Image (cartoon, rainbow, N blue to C red):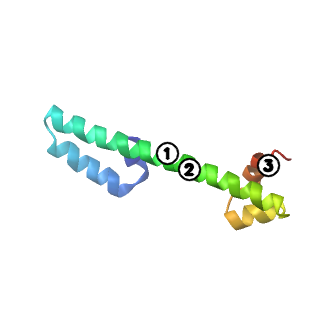
Amino acid sequence: MQVAEHDAGVRSACMVLKDLSADEQTRLAAEMREKAWRDEMDRLDGVIAKTNSEHVKNMYEDGLAPDQIAKYLRLNLSDVKGILNIQ
């Protein structure tokens, strides 16, 4: 349960769920819900990365320097340079 490692509330809920779900069917249903949630978070992470990449490129084309872009988008300068393929 990797999701539970990152959030204390989720971790606590998972422990309660494990205690309450002594039967296999309930446990499998909980695992399926967790997988669906994890898949959705991965999808959203991809959307955010794509959006950031587009913003970085647009800002650079508009004349902003990589360090300014990093500041405004709250990204690492090395990430901005990587998106722009510059050093």
- Name the image quarter holding residue 68: bottom right
Q: Residues within 10 Å of mark 3 (few under 14, many from 20)?
A: some
Please tell me which residue is depicted at 61% across the width and 50% down the height of the picture.
Answer: 49
Report which quarter residue 30 is drawn in.
top left
Tell me the SS state at disc 1.
Answer: helix
Give the image location of residue 84, x and y in percent.
79, 49
- Which residue in the structure is indicated by mark 3? 84
Distance, label 2 to label 1, CA atoms, is 6 Å
Q: Residue furthest top?
A: 24
Q: Residue at x 16, y 41 (%)?
A: 21
Q: Which mark is residue 47?
A: 2
CB-based contact (under 8 Å), mark 2 and mark 1: yes
**Secondary-structure class at tag 3:** helix
Residue 48 falls left or right of residue 40: right
Q: Is residue 59 above or below residue 78?
A: below
Residue 66 visible to the viewer: no
Q: Is residue 39 above or below residue 16?
A: above
Q: Residue at x 29, y 53 (%)?
A: 12
Three-letter amino acid code of the residue under disc 2: Val
Residue located at (17% from left, 32% from top): 24
Give the residue pinned by disc 1.
43
Q: Residues within 10 Å of mark 2 (few under 14, many from 20)?
A: few
First in sequence, mark 1 or 3: give its number: 1
Question: Between residues 84 and 31, which one lies in front from this camera angle?
Answer: 84
Who comes first in sequence, dot 3 or dot 2? 2
Amino acid carrying label 1: it is: Arg
State the quadrant of the N terminus: top left
Q: Amino acid at mark 3?
A: Leu
Is residue 32 among what the camera can see? yes
